[in-house]
Image (cartoon, grey):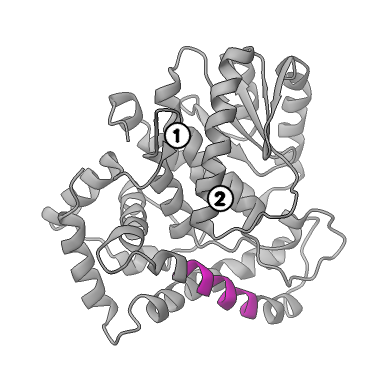
Amino acid sequence: MSASSPYSGRLAELAVSFALILFLVSCAGPSWDGRYREAMDRVIPDMQRCSLRTPRYVAYSDAGQTRVVPVADLMEQAADAYDRLLGIDTSEEEKKSTIYVYGTWKRFALVAESLGFPPSVRAFYSPVAPAAVHVLLDETTFDNITPLLLHEGLHQRADLHCRVSGARTGNNSSPAERNPIGLPLWLNEGLATYMESARLVNGRLVTGIPNLPRLRELQNMIRNNYRFSATGVLSRSYGEPFSSGDYAVAWGIVYDLAHAAGRDTFLDKYIATLKTDLSAALPELSANTPIGGSNNGGLFEAWNPVLAEQSLKTFQKVVTGDGRSMFDWERDWRRRMLDVVP
C-alpha cells in the first residue's frame, strides 16, 4: 500500500466516516432519508452528465470521462477481491452498484453534509437510498484516493450481499431493510482496512499487501504494552465505540487469518461458519422481536448484541478450537504481528 502522508492522515477520518455509516445502517429514518434524497435530487442532474457501466457498477461523474474511467476500472477489479474475501457467489445477474465521482467540492459537500459527515471526509458509502459510494476527486490524486475507494467499496459490497435471511419481512420492499447485516463490526472494518492497501501493478489490482499505517500502529501498541484486548474487539457491537487502535487490531486479525503460516484458510472457514451460525440464530430472534418502524428498527437493535456474541463464539470454534484459550491465541497472535515485515 502507499504510505503517503495524505493517506496516513486520513485514518481518523475513516474512523469518523465509518462510525457515522454504522449509525445510518441501523438507525436510518425519515430525517436522514429526507436530507440525503433532497441533496441527491439537487446534484444528480449534473452528476449524470457522464456515466460508465461495468458488469457490476454504474459510475456517474460531473468531472468527465477521464476521471470516471479509472475509478470504474478499479472498483470492477476490487469487486472480484471483495467477493473472494466475503465468500460471495455472484453467478447470477445482480443489480449494479452506484458510484458518484465528484470533480466539484461544492456538490460533494452538499451530499456529505446531508448525512452529517465532517468537511475532512473525501469518500463515503451511503446505505440510505439511493445507496452509493461517493468520492471527491478534485485536486486529489487518484493514488491518494484509492485506499478510501477500496475501503468504502468493501462496505458497499458487504451491505449488498452479506445479509442474513430469515427475518420477518413486514411491509418492507428492500432486502437491506428486511434482513440484518451478517458481518460483525470487527470483520466489516477489518476487511475494509485489509483492502485499503491493495495496489494497481501494471493495471492489475494486487491484494494482501501489509497495510503499513495499521501495521505500524498495531506494532507500536504491542511493543509499548498498550492496554487493549483482541477478544474485546472481536465481541464489539455496532454502535459501540471503535477507536483507531481498534481498527488496527481488526486489520491485524484479518491479516493473520488470511496470511499467517498454517492459517491461510482460517479466514474463509470463519466467514463460512459464521454465515451458518447466524442463519440459525436469526429466525427465533425475528419471531420474538416486534417489527419497529418502516425499516425494522426493533430487529436491528435486538440483532446487534446477538451478532457480536456469535462473532466471538464462532471465532473460538473455528480458530481456537484446538483447545487453546483466547488468552493463548492472543499472545501468539501478538508475536506473529510483530514479525510482519512491510
- At x 62%, y 79%, the residue is 281
Rendering quarter of residue 98: top right
Q: Residue 180's x, y, as percent?
A: 66, 62
- At x 45%, y 28%, the residue is 203
**Number of disc labels:** 2
Q: Residue 264's x, y, as percent?
A: 34, 64
Q: Secondary structure at mark 2?
A: helix
User: Does 82 appear above or below 315?
Assistant: above
Work out whether residue 111 or residue 4 is closer to the camera in this orientation and state it: 4
- At x 53%, y 57%, the residue is 86
Write down the residue under mark 2.
22
* Image-based side of 341 in relation to 61, left or right: left
Range of residues picked out in magenta? 270-281
Work out whether residue 13 or residue 337 is closer to the camera in this orientation and state it: 337
Amino acid type, callout 1: Arg
Res 239 visible = no
* Image-based side of 205 in relation to 27, left or right: left
Is 274 magenta? The answer is yes
